[in-house]
Amino acid sequence: MRNIIGNEAEFVAHFLVQERIRGFDMMLPEFLSQREKERFFHALNDEQKIDALNEIIEESKHIVFLGGAGVSTESGIPDFRSKDGLYNKKDSKFRKYKPEYLLSYDCLDKKPEIFFSYFRKNLDCRILQPNDAHKKLAEMELKGKLDGIITQNIDGLHQKAGSKKVWEIHGSALRCHCVSCRTEYGTDFIFENAEDIPHCPKCGRMIRPDVTLYGEFLPQKAYEEAVALIRYADCLMIGGTSLEVGSAAQLAHMYHGKYLVIINRGKTKMEGRADLVFHDSIGKVMNQIEV
């Protein structure tokens, strides 16, 4: 008897989910359980998923966006780990070094000529422009629907699109400073400097980019504020990252709010926890958000 009741209960729950999907009218239901919530979202078709995304954004009061390299690929910046990414480029000048080493503090410290050569060739993003994802996030912030952006990117495109509340947990390639006197220099200083290793005009020591290199700690203030944002959020949107890099993965796992949305072309860790998953162009998906 218990088995029959149990099976019947399962059937009824499934029927209720299907009825809600068929009658989807831009109003998310109140879910009786986490399992029912998962069934509802996982059964949606592509059009319904966009409707659900817009309803989540409308309902949520504290939305945070956590983004990686995939947010900027549609602006012409290669990501790192995909088959066409920066780490898979064939370049005879750098082929004897591991890609992670070329962007490490160890390389900057021990082989600065190699570091700056690689940095100038591959991380000059000054002429690139924001794409639809950057613009939509700036619009969401302007209209009071986004508490902030936490980005692993160092290209400054969120700010170029108009976003003000940006936490750069890996720093920025558009800023640099002297390692000794800490004097700050403009965006062009490293990229247009005639010296192989740029030096400070004031004290003669090396100028370095304000990026977090392998082997360095994340900027403490930005990371602590990112943690606070994540813990206060009731909706976390994760975009353009596989969550392979420790800092982003750690932040994502700190989230325990109501809704989790993932937008990434490839498979992403934590998809099992997400309410909505889009394996598509982030600009295409973001363009369908109505704010």
Image (cartoon, helix red, strand yellow):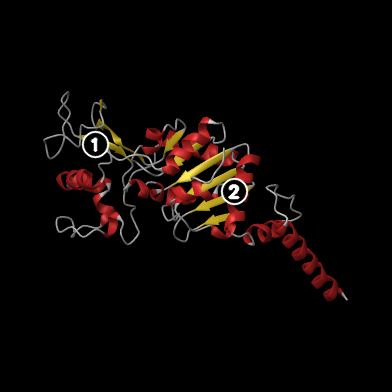
Q: For the residue marked with disc 2, what is the amino acid? A: Leu
Q: Is residue 71 above or below residue 224?
A: below
Residue for badge 2? 53
Q: Is residue 226 left or right of residue 53?
A: left
Q: Crowding at label 1, few (<14), some or many (≥20) Cα neighbours within 10 Å?
A: many
Question: Percent from the top left, x then y, of residue 230?
Answer: 55, 41
Find numbered disc 1 in the image and state the secondary structure of the residue it sits on: strand
Toward the viewer: 136 or 276?
136
Question: Percent from the top left, x then y, of residue 254?
Answer: 55, 47
Residue at horizontal 31 percent and vertical 51 percent from the top:
78
> Which image quarter is the C terminus in?
top right
Q: Is residue 28 above or below residue 129?
A: below
Residue 217 seen: yes
Residue at horizontal 80 percent and vertical 72 percent from the top:
7
What mark, if any, has residue 208 been given in the picture? 1
Instruction: State how far apart marks 1 and 2 are (Cα).
Output: 41 Å
Toward the viewer: 46 or 68?
46
Toward the viewer: 117 or 281?
281
Question: Percent from the top left, x then y, of residue 87?
Answer: 28, 57
Q: Nearer the viewer, mark 1 or mark 2?
A: 2
Q: Is residue 245 left or right of residue 254?
A: left
Q: For the residue marked with disc 1, what is the amino acid? A: Arg
Q: Is residue 262 left or right of residue 26?
A: left
Among numbered discs 1 and 2, the one appearing first in the sequence: 2
Contact (Cβ within 8 Å) of mark 1 with mark 2? no
